Structure formats: structure tokens, C-alpha cells
Amino acid sequence: MSTDGKMWGGRFAGGLDPRFAAFQDSTEHDLVLAFADLDTNLAWSEALCSAGVVTEDELERIAAAIGELAAEWHENGIPDSEAEDVHGLIEQQLVARLGDLGKRIHTGRSRNDQVATDLRLHLRECAGLLVESIEGLCLSLVEKAAAHAADPMPGYTHLQRAQPITIGHHALAYVEMLARDRERLLDATARMDQCPLGSGALAGTAFAIDRDALAARLAFHGGATRNSLDATASRDHLCELLFASAMAMTHLSRLCEDYVFFASHEAAFLSFGDAVATGSSLMPQKRNPDAMELVRGKAAQVQGALQSLLALLKGLPLGYNRDLQHDKELVLPALEATHECLLVAATAVDHAHFDTARCRAEAGKGYLNATDLADLLVAAGVPFRDAHEVVGRAVNRAVELGVELHELPEDEQRTLLPQLDGELAQRLAVDAVLQRRDVLGGTAPERVAAEVKRWRILLAEWAEGYHELDDLDPDVDVPALEEEHG
Ligand code: ARG
């Protein structure tokens, strides 16, 4: 390290142009990796000790200095520095405490394998938080479904009233989507669970490092990465996490859109409690669903980050290129935004109060039982295509008369639907229509209640599964991996 604290001073006599110095400084975006970087510094020093590069005594001094730094930063935060990135900052601090010994820690290592490792350590924590917050939102939605398993509301296709569904069925549709997002995150987390440290700048380290042991030490369950060029230059795991996040945000955004519509005067299916509704500075009567709109809007940022990262990677030659430094400013805020939105969405769902009487009344209006009338004709022996035609005419007549299908006067029924023998009101009532969808995946109240039960069991299992994520904590002992070709 040169006297001015640079990590690469030897060939350079002149200083950096101040504008460029500020431009290339990444501490604003990578300081968040500081604790991960302390972990990798300690693990690397231990590996250097095993390789005979530093002695046991020296390792003890290094470990003590790293411990001190961690404690100080936990207590007081991380001080400003002139370093160009978090790795430089930590090296400066260790050199300040350890003198020449501090300068030996970077032996056989590059910031390229270091940042790749730090990022994976940090990202698995971020992914863990996302999984946890998805589970939280699922819990809110499952409870909403439990409360409204038998409460009807209009269901839509093309935003036109289609058939009645239960409010619970609507809530559980989002649970299904979010459960897939959760799985995608876990899947991506498992795929990035390999340790790049020891890959050097691009070609591997020249020191006798036991990389499998190093991977186990840092709690990477998939062992060490198998190609140093790939390990230092690839960022597809970031893309995967961003995709899973962007997909979750897209699901959230649709939920928000539904609830914004449900809260409109036109639908009036639900209202938001004071905790998540906002007013207008001008119009005193307003109660706006801003929580939903802000979450819906944030989806744009996360989708944009995914697109930007893909564009950043495309066309980069192997191996590491400095362009990759921009990965953090794309991925980290996007994951944070997703986490925040999941938490806010859960709160908003908790404070969304359905007007069940209105939802029920509206589910009975707009000919949502027309399909069921056709089905009744089918049961009476009419081929479906003909029944469809007959009911279409009956709907036209009902529209003319300004009534619902089940309100058609008896003489009209006899003329339009001669195959049926009355009792339309009862057979086309909204509860009867719901009840008829008693099929796996259907909206019948019993089916929804059964799904609620299933989800409650799954949610409890997920909650227990957290301990698996805790295993990813580097301080937890992980058994050394078996030699694959032994
Ligand atoms: N700050 C860089 C990054 O985040 C790591 C440093 C790599 N620098 C280098 N000259 N190879 O990607």
C-alpha cells in the first residue's frame, strides 16, 4: 500500500484527477459489505495461516484487530475514509492497527474474488429477509382468506364482471404467486451458495489454500466455485435474485391494482384503515390508497434494475471488468425496495376492510350467474352450445326488463327457458353458484377453507425452516465437505 493509502500505487507518480477519483469511488454503494468483508478477511487470514503464509501468533493478532474493528463499527458506525472502496478501507484500517502484518493479508487474493465473495455473503442475508417478508405477506393474505372464505364478491375477466368468487379465493390466488416467488428466491440462493474466495483476480491463487475448507468456514454449502474466471466475472446469481424480486414486485403490483380498484367509489368493496390511507391537501373528502399506489410504482424500479443489470453484463469480455462495480448500486437498492414493499403490502392487507354486504350484493348483479343458467340447461339435456345461445337471449331480455336472470318474470322464463322447471332464484343464488365450484382449485367456500388449512400448515413449516437459513450464518460450524474425487 502506498503512503497515500492507495492499494495500487507502484506504477503511478501522479494523482488521480479529482473528478475521476470521486467517480470511481464505490464506498457509497459497497460500504454495506463491510461486515461481510471483515468475515472474508478473517477466513482468508486463517487460510493463509494453514498455508504457512502467516503464523498462528500473527493470525491471532489479525483476528483480534478484525474483532476490534467489528465491535467499534457496530457501536459507532463506519468512519469516513479516503479509500476508493470498502476493501481498501478495511485494508487501511488493518494496516493502521497491525503495521506490516496488515499488509500481508492481501497475499494471493484480489479484490475481484473478495468482492464476489462479500456480495454472496451479503446477498444471502438479503434473500433471507425477502423470503421472510414474503412469508409475512402470505400470512396476512391467508388470514384475510380465512376471514372471508365464504364471502362472495364479483370475479372479473377483462375487468368485466364474470362469475362470483369468494374474497378468500382472491386472497389465496396471491398467496400462490408469492409462494412461487419465495421458491424462486430460495432456488437462486442455493445456486449462489458457492465460495469464490481463492479465485484470485481471474486465474486462481498461487498459494496452497484449501478452498473447500475456506468455503465451509464461510458456510457456503455448495463448496468452492470450480472456475476462477467464472467466479470473478459472473453475476447471473444477481440477475436471478433480481428476477425473483421483480416477479414478486409484479405480483405485488397487481395486488395493489386490484385493491386500488376495490377501494374506488365505483367498486367500494373495501376501505383502507387510517393506518394506510392518506388524504388530499386540497379535497377534504379524500381517502386515497397511497400505500398501494406507492408499492405499485416501486415495481418499476425493480424491473428496471433487472433490465439494467442484464444490459450491464451483456458484451463484457471475460474476466472481471470494472463495469461490474455498478452491480451493487443496481441490485442492493432493488432488493431493499422489494423488502420494504412486501412489509408495507402486508400492513395494507391487514388494514383493508372488505364490505362483505356490498360485495355479496354486487356478486348477485351483472349476470354473473349466466354460466350457471347454461349449466342448468345442460343438466336438462340441452347441448352446451345451444344453452349458451339460449342464455344469451335470456340475458338480452333481462337487460331490456332491467332485471337479473333469476328475477325474470315467470312467463318470460317459460318462453325463454322452456326446458327448466322454475326455482331459478334458488338455483342461481350467489351461494349456490359458489357451491357448484366444488372442485380442487375452485372457489367453493369449502374448497377455500380447505386451502386456508393447507396454507396454515405450510406457513408453519416455512416458519420452522428459518433455522435452515440461520445455518447460513458464517459463525455457525459447517461440517467440512467430503472430497468429491477421493
Ligand atoms: N470495487 C470493485 C467492485 O465492486 C472491486 C474492485 C476491483 N477493482 C479492480 N481494479 N479489479 O467491483
Image: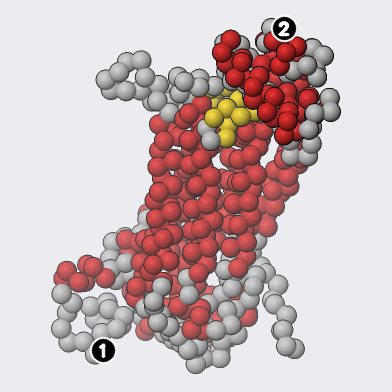
Q: Dot 2, how many residues are within 10 Å of its Cα: few (below 14), some (14-19), or many (20+)? A: few
Task: Say which quadrant the N terminus sits in.
Answer: bottom left
420 to the left or right of 255:
right
Q: Name the one closer to the observer, 82 or 435.
A: 435
Residue 437 coordinates in the image, percent (x, y): 76, 31
Kindly identify the amino acid type of the residue bearing the numbered disc 2.
Answer: Asp
329 to the left or right of 449:
left
Q: Dot 1, how many residues are within 10 Å of its Cα: few (below 14), some (14-19), or many (20+)? A: few
Which residue carries the number 1 mark? 10
Residue 120 can be seen in this image: no
Instruction: State the separation of the CA atoms marked 1 and 2.
Output: 100 Å
Residue 359 coordinates in the image, percent (x, y): 60, 19
Element at label 1: loop
Q: Name the one closer to the observer, 72 or 274.
A: 274
Residue 299 can be seen in this image: yes
User: Mark 1 near mark 2, Cβ–Cβ under 8 Å?
Assistant: no
On whether ligand 1 comes within 8 Å of the CB at mark 2, the answer is: no
Q: Quadrant of residue 65?
A: bottom left
Which residue carries the number 2 mark? 411
Kindly identify the amino acid type of the residue bearing the numbered disc 1.
Answer: Gly
Which dot, 1 or 2, sits closer to the camera? 2
Residue 449 coordinates in the image, percent (x, y): 75, 31
Element at label 2: helix
**Residue at point 32% right, 15% down?**
284
Q: Name the one closer to the observer, 288 or 152.
A: 152
Total marks in image = 2
Residue situated furthest front in the rendering: 415
Q: In the rendering, which numbered label is found on residue 2? A: none
**Residue at point 47% right, 20% down?**
266
